[in-house]
Image (tube, rainbow, N blue to C red):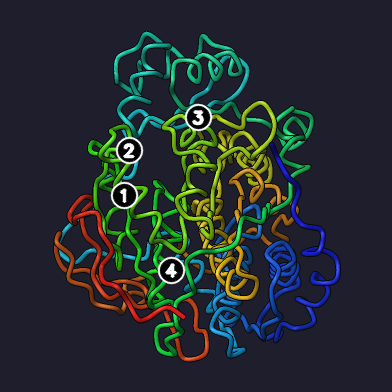
Amino acid sequence: MFMPAMHSLHGPMLAGAARGADSGGMTDVARHMLAEMTAALGGAETPLRIEGEDRLASAFAVSDLASAAIGAAGCALSDYAGRGDPVVVDQRRASLWFHMSLRPQGWDLPAPWDSVAGDYAARDGWIRLHTNAAHHKAAALSVLGAPAERDAVAAAVKGWNRQALEAAVVAAGGCAAAMHSAEEWATHPQGAAVAAEPLIDVIPAPRAARPSPALDPDRPLRGVRVLDLTRILAGPVATRFLAGFGADVLRLDPPDWEEPALEAEVTPGKTCARLDLKSAPGQARFLALLAEADVLIHGYRADALDGLGLGQAVRQKANPGLIDVALNAYGWTGPWTNRRGFDSLVQMSSGIAEAGQARFGAERPVPLPVQALDHAAGYLLAAAALRGLVRRRDTGHGHRWRTSLARVAALLMRYPAKDMGGTLSPGGVAQDFTEAEATPWGPAHRLPSPLSVGGAQLSFARPAGPLGADRPGWQDTGPAHE
């Protein structure tokens, strides 16, 4: 059952967060976004400064969202470290981290999209097909009765009503989203449900059995164990952030899961192992790892872990003081709670792509210049994990924290860009990428940290690596727990 966010997190914190921020280069939009995030997350006020004015061209204030979301995670980290360290966000770097942080040297990343994935004109409007996963692609093609050729798919889609095709593809186990306007989404049952949800839903859990890690001033998250059950893209962004400040992140993937275009982007600092959660031995190993974790971050559909027999009650029994952080695509209430979804689909459903088309006067949908819903949600997940660690340390209780891509979209859509022009390409320029990294695929350069918390910045103890390269265990025992 859906539970509302705790009312004590709202109201006074909104004004306080705005007053507590060091204005620096912060725009009013970034300030308001940060205040809303801080109010939803709770926690102490932290001085924050945003430097730079570079921004991405967009119909919405994407660069302000990037600065605010990364800033919210930085403020939560400062609160966890307990020293009141000032937080500084570089807006240019923040915007670039919302695209790709890695630039290969002498080799190429795989194409990010399947050849069939994309936007198609239906009989009465536009629809997006998400076909990167083989089974999602098979589902869409089976409904359309078309071969895996873009022209054939386009011809087949023209004969469908967009809503009917969306429903048919979803019923077949695929992923699709008909394009709505903001007005249509506001009256849609799912859009109305999401609008009524808090940005962050916080639910107390029993008292913790596991003590908090001792603080390391140089690597503030050293000794924090994070179990990562996430895929493309918000969850991996969250756990990358935590790994970058010293957390022991163990990512677990199914035996057959691959995401070659993103491995080098989201795995630095992590242990990456495979575990079959559908098998009895895999579940036993998972529960043993969970019992030793401080944080679990998961991005499965809302009912997926329950379907595996690993629902909330089972997880809570294994680790009563767990900080359980979850992401869903389309929200936690409403008829689409258990629907598969991705950033690009939520942009179509929520009205973002239609607003981009209208504001730019384009002939087809215009999405955001980056997958901003994924990235912003990722930093909010990281911030929630850190706020959870603070609460557990202060109260002895774990907590459950939840947000969704659709709810982040609702936040962003309240801030259309006043000037849709930009000074920054999403991919940046070669001079932006200054941190050398030796990956298994070849040499690369990564963007410098977009964030400074006191003297701490993102840095990774190990380079990015392929999924499943490690055994499913913690890197080390870390320092003693308090």
| Residue highlighted by disc 1 | 252
Up the image or down, 337 lies above or below 89; here it is above
Q: Secondary structure at mark 3?
A: strand
**Is there a contact, CB below 8 Å, between mark 2 and mark 4?**
no
Relative to 82, is 308 on the left or the right?
A: left
Residue kind at label 1, given as amino acid type = Leu
Mark 1 crowdedness (10 Å alpha carbons): few <14, some 14-19, many ≥20: many
In which quarter of the view is residue 271 placed? bottom left
Up the image or down, 387 lies above or below 408; here it is below
Distance in Å between CA atoms under marks 1 and 4: 16 Å
| Residue highlighted by disc 4 | 242
| Residue highlighted by disc 3 | 128
Q: Horizontal and vertical percent for residue 297?
A: 47, 54
Q: Nearer the viewer, mark 1 or mark 4?
A: 1
Q: Secondary structure at mark 4?
A: helix
Q: Which disc number belongs to residue 277?
A: 2
Of label 2 and label 4, which has the lower sequence position? 4
Residue kind at label 4, given as amino acid type = Leu
Of label 1 and label 3, which has the lower sequence position? 3
**Is there a contact, CB below 8 Å, between mark 1 and mark 3?**
no
Taking the spot 67% from the left edge, 86% from the top edge, the residue there is: 47
Mark 2 crowdedness (10 Å alpha carbons): few <14, some 14-19, many ≥20: many
Q: Secondary structure at mark 1?
A: strand
Distance in Å between CA atoms under marks 3 and 2: 31 Å
Residue kind at label 3, given as amino acid type = Arg
Is residue 257 at least partly visible in the picture? no
Question: Of 390 and 211, which appears nearest the observer?
Answer: 211
In which quarter of the view is residue 108 placed? bottom left
